[in-house]
Image (cartoon, grey):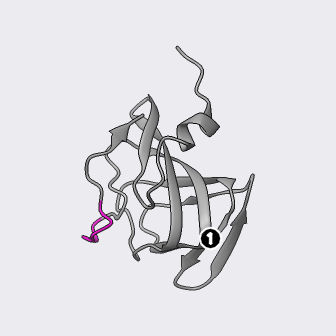
Amino acid sequence: MKKINLTEKLTQFTDHWNPRVIASLNGQQVRLVKFKGEFVWHSHTHEDELFYVLKGSFTMQFRDRNVQLHEGEMIVVPRGVEHCPMAEEEVSVMLFEPAETVNTGHTASNKTRSTLEEI
């Protein structure tokens, strides 16, 4: 059991769309990631995803609407729902999802990260 400083963890990386694991519990992972630009459209067959904005803002695009998220706000994307995060400027986000969740779902891309670094 140790305290985790999110601000300090975020200083350990500068790249975008490459989640880092900062904690694990009950088969779930808490991940930190920085976004900038548009991700890939994807969905997850078996996993829900939680996105919590730590710094900045981004748009979660859905096929039927867009949801703007700002610091201190979060959204849960239910399994099976196609989505695509997009950030005009860099945003820092905490993710909470099952450990087996691949960031691009079943959509192969140069942004796919099947193995995540723990920091």
Residue stretch in magenta:
106-112
Q: Which residue is mark 1?
A: 89
Find the residue positioned furthest to the top: 1
Determine whether, in the image, residue 9 is placed left or right of residue 29: right
Against 72, residue 3 (above or below) is above
Determine whether, in the image, residue 79 is placed left or right of residue 11: left
Badge 1, how many Cα within 10 Å: few under 14, some, many 20+?
few
Judging depth in this view, the residue of 101 and 93 nearest the camera is 93
Residue that appears at 43% across and 61% down:
17
Is residue 94 on the magenta stretch?
Answer: no
Query: Percent position (x, y) of residue 60?
Result: 58, 72
Answer with the quarter of the image where residue 91 lies. bottom right
Under tag 1, what secondary structure? strand
Against 39, residue 53 (above or below) is above
Against 80, residue 100 (above or below) is above
Judging depth in this view, the residue of 110 and 59 nearest the camera is 110
Query: In this figure, what is the number of numbered marks?
Result: 1
Residue that appears at 55% across and 42% down:
11
Judging depth in this view, the residue of 101 and 54 nearest the camera is 54
Residue that appears at 41% across and 77% down:
41
Mainly helix, strand or loop, the magenta region?
loop
Amino acid at the residue labelled 1? Glu
Against 45, residue 109 (above or below) is below
